[in-house]
Structure formats: structure tokens, C-alpha cells
Amino acid sequence: MSTAEPRPPIPFQDWWRSAFAGDYLERYAHRDDADADRLVAALGPLLAGAPGPVADVGCGAGRHLVRLRAAGIPAVGLDYSADLLRAGQGPRCRADMRSPPFAGGLGAALFLFTAFGYFDDAGNLACLRAWTRRLAPGGRLVLDLPDPAALVLPPDGGRLLADGSAVHEARRWDGRRVEKAITLVRPDGTRLERFESVRLYGREAWPLVAWAAGCGCDLAGHPDRGRLLLVLRPLT
């Protein structure tokens, strides 16, 4: 297994363009169905009475999407990654999350499994505002995110995937962004480098962030420790 330190190949502003290629599903295969089941169960009360269909923003291969629909929630997914959309299930479309391809009337927009914070502060706020404008009266934004106050980064290290590929991951947290540099080495020696960078906002910052997006903010109970479940509702 290679122990070379991976280096970020691209600036953080553009990391999401390549980080969610087909190998993403291999690298995150340990995120099993059980955690998706727990989260969707927790979302049920938050989505009860939603005045329209639900958008699963950054849906990836649809792990949460299929469970939402199985629970009777009319949900559609959106993702930028063509690879993940091809690999997935459920009704989905391809788009940049900052430009929602919906005219309006959504009962809720969901950002699950840390599907928010990909951009700089201005870009993140623009994303929230764009989705707020697509909500029906009584609609809401729901965000599932790490809690910075409880953040514990695993040590840098490596692991083997089922096909024998070696993965090395190095993480850092600067108090604003949590970043991960990944090197994937295939059995034939082929190397892939990926980079992830997510802006995290603490629970004390969220009322101001929500207000700037034209929303109020409530904190709901998350089924997993160390994570936040936030509900943003338009103020008008």
C-alpha cells in the first residue's frame, strides 16, 4: 500500500467537479443502508405535511432517494455527477445545485450526507437562496451536516477496497473547512487523486446564515451523534 501523502490536485472551489466520479461509490461503500434508514426515519416528521414534492439535492446514486419514495414521500433527486446518476436509482436529473431546474412549488429541499458547504461563503448562501425561492408556501430546507463542535477527524491512513485497490486519506480542519485529500491506487498501479473541501458552520452561526438566506432556523434531533439536522423555513 502506498504511503505517499496525497496532494490536492485542484483548488477547493472546483473540487466537486471530479470528486464524485464513479470511484466515489467504492470509496464510500462503508456508508451502508442502515445509516440511510435512520436518517430517513428521522426526516418523516419534518416532512409531514410538506406542501409539494421533495428535492433530494446532491442525491448521488439515490441511497436516500429510494427510501424517501418507499416511505411515500414524492421525492426527486438532483446531482451534478453523471457517473453517480448512471449508477443510481429513482427519478433524478443532472444540474448544478446552485441553479435548481425547478420552477417552484417544492415542499422541501433536502441536503443529506453533507451535501451542503461545497462552495465559498457567497456561493453557499446563493445556493440556499436559490432553493428558498423554489419552495411553496410552507416549504422548508432540511440540512444534514457534521457538527463542528463535535468534529473528530480520523487519523491519516490507508485501507484496501474489495478489488485490492489501496486508498490513502489525509484530512485537515482549519476551523472553517474540513478537507480530505485522497489517493486511490489500483492493483495495476493506476493512480487517481481526489480532493474534498466542505465549509462547516457551527450551530451558533446558523441563525445568521439562515437569516441571510431569508429563513428562520430550527435545530431538529439527529439520529447520529456528532451531526446537525437543521430546518430552514422562509420568513415570508
Image (cartoon, grey):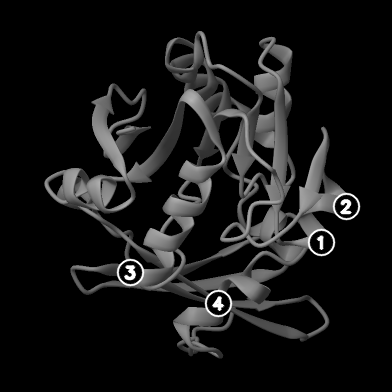
Mark 3 secondary-structure assignment: helix
Say whether disc 2 or disc 3 marks the residue closer to the N-terminus. Answer: 2
How many other residues sit within 10 Å of disc 2, few (<14), some (14-19) or many (≥20)? Answer: few
Q: Tell me the kind of residue under disc 2.
A: Arg
Residue ID at (33%, 26%): 222
Q: Tell me the kind of residue under disc 3.
A: Asp
Residue ID at (31%, 39%): 215
Viewed as shown, does residue 46 lie left or right of 96?
A: left
Residue sitting at the far right: 86
Asked if the residues shown at circle 2 and circle 3 are in contact, with their CB atoms under 8 angstroms apart, the answer is: no
Disc 2/disc 3 C-alpha distance (Å): 30 Å
Looking at this view, is 103 or 217 the one in front? 103
Say whether disc 4 or disc 2 marks the residue closer to the N-terminus. Answer: 4
Q: According to the image, label 3 marks what residue? A: 121
Q: Nearer the viewer, mark 2 or mark 3?
A: 3
How many other residues sit within 10 Å of disc 4, few (<14), some (14-19) or many (≥20)? Answer: some
Which percent across, then down, holds residue 112? 51, 40
Residue ID at (72%, 19%): 69
Q: According to the image, label 2 marks what residue? A: 86
